[in-house]
Image (tube, rainbow, N blue to C red):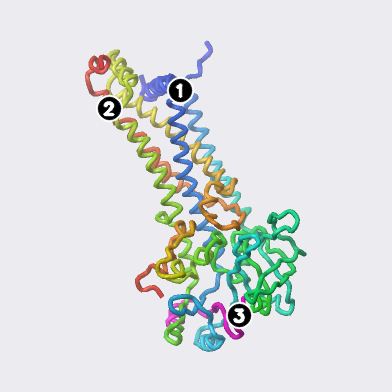
Amino acid sequence: MRRLIRKSDIFLAYVLLQAAALGLMLVDAAVRRSLAEPVLRQRAEVVRVLGLTDLALFTEARYTRNPSLADRHSPFQEHPLSLEHFPSGSVVSPPSHLTLPAGR
Amino acid sequence: MSLIEKHRNIIDYTLSSLGRRKGKTFAVCLVYSFIIFLLASVVFFTQAIKREADLLLREAPEMTVQRLEAGRQTTVPAAYADGIGRIRGVQSVQKRLWGYYFDSLTGANYTVMVNASLNGREGQAIVGSGVLLRGAAEGESRKIQAGDSLPVKTYRGEALMLKVAGILPFASELETADLIQVSERDYRDIFNAEAGRYTDLALQVRNRKELATIATKIVRQYPDTRPILREDILRTYDAIFDWRGGLSIMTMAGALFAFIILAWDKATGLSAEEKKEIGILKAIGWETGDILQVKFWEGVSVSLTSFSIGIFAAYLHVFVGSSLLFEPVLKGWSVLYPDFRLTPHIDAYQLVSLLFITVLPYTVATIIPSWRSATIDPDSVMRA
């Protein structure tokens, strides 16, 4: 007699397929990481040679272009009531060395 | 009947039950997947960019020394570099010149810095691959190419044409997209910068363990300076993309509130149809435990499906699609935005964390109202 495929069998296969796909995603991530390694080394060399200190992610204001070099007052530099208004200013948190009470 | 066989029967019933409510199940899966997609995108993006910043900025200068005047960064006299160079433990002091230049033609902000290899090659520049050139005829900006001439307006109001001698590698766009490297003479011409003064100093020390001591000595000798250690730079990107940071908190708060509404809708009660179904099951002999198992498998199947869809979509979005949804948030009013593709730095820990903060609450929220309905008299449930 032909055995019917039950919904629970399909469900089990589906769950296993999902787990396998998640595993494949982790494998893909590992492969991409190993492929990117030489490029990352080359990029790190560019950083070393040029003496760069920050990523060029937010180029709209100088304190977001170089957050690690920003001073405590830079977002309010124009005058004391000039509130910080650049969109990326609300995305970028101040660097930890500026928020420490005994920060330099 | 074995326990496995019993669960298989319950799963058979659960899937048929979900199939009868196709529209509702599909809508719940869609919303739920989108919430997981948002949460996972933020987690993948922030972890990957933090890791990438950490790997790249390990090569940043060991110590950068700035000078402050009335709370703002100002130029450093060459004498400071000589004095700091004499501090025991300092191996070298590099006097750096760099600044920001707003190009009114394209509306882009550039970082102009001196490259010593261009000294003696005045009028030439090495630029980042994101630098734009305003086309004369078409009136639109295009990416600059080697051999192009980049017009720069100096702080004295004169025009300076810089011949593009080279383009920095496209792969390093995340770090160099907005760079314009020129000779020292061109830099001083562009910014009308006073001779003998520098933007900051980049230090190399003999022993890294002495960094903090050297920083203290510098501040004691020159109280108007501010040393920034490489560790400070590395911690900056941890802070920017911290879970409390703007990007994470904005996206996660929205997604979590949507998720709370979804779970709350589930937890506050079942539809009349669902209650009637529970009443009938109880009337034909199902026990409360069996009904809870049905609801458990319902929650698990919806959650797992949504979790997988959300996670795969987030992976594609962040690591294949260059985080397109985050671009407007990160770009702000900038004209330049680096074209970059992050390396996936994901692990099983991130996936398990995401699974626990999404699947578990939803499954619990599915079971609670069913338990309330399943414990009351089937007759009253069916009559209600």
| Up-down relation of residue B120 to residue B32 (above or below) | below
Residue picked out by circle 1? B22
Q: Secondary structure at mark 2?
A: helix
Q: Is residue B112 above or below residue B46?
A: below
Residue underneath mark 2: B371
Q: Quadrant of residue B375?
A: top left
Q: Earlier in the sequence, mark 3 or mark 1?
A: 1
Ranked by sequence position, the earlier of labels 2 and 1 is: 1
- On the picture, is B134 further left or further right than B90? right
The image quarter containing residue B78 is bottom right
- Helix, strand or loop status at disc 3: loop
Tell me the kind of residue under disc 1: Lys
Calculate the distance from the C-alpha at mark 2 to the C-alpha at mark 1. 23 Å
The magenta stretch spans residue B243: no
Q: Is residue B296 left or right of residue B126?
A: left
Task: Place residue B21 in its image quadrant.
Answer: top left
- Residue type indicated by callout 2: Trp
Tell me the kind of residue under disc 3: Ala
In the rendered structure, find residue B193 and report the number of the disc placed on it: 3
Residue B354 in the image: x percent, y percent?
A: 43, 44
As measured in the structure, the alpha-carbon distance from the residue carrying label 2 to the one carrying label 3 is 75 Å
The stretch in magenta equals B191-216
For residue B213, say whether it is visible: yes
Percent position (x, y) of residue B139?
71, 55
Which residue is situated farthest in the right direction here?
B147
Q: Chain of mark 3?
A: B
Residue depicted at 50% across the width and 87% down the height: B87
Q: Find the residue positioned furthest to the top.
A: A1
| Residue drawn at point x = 62 percent, y = 54 percent | B339
Identify the subunit bearing mark 2: B
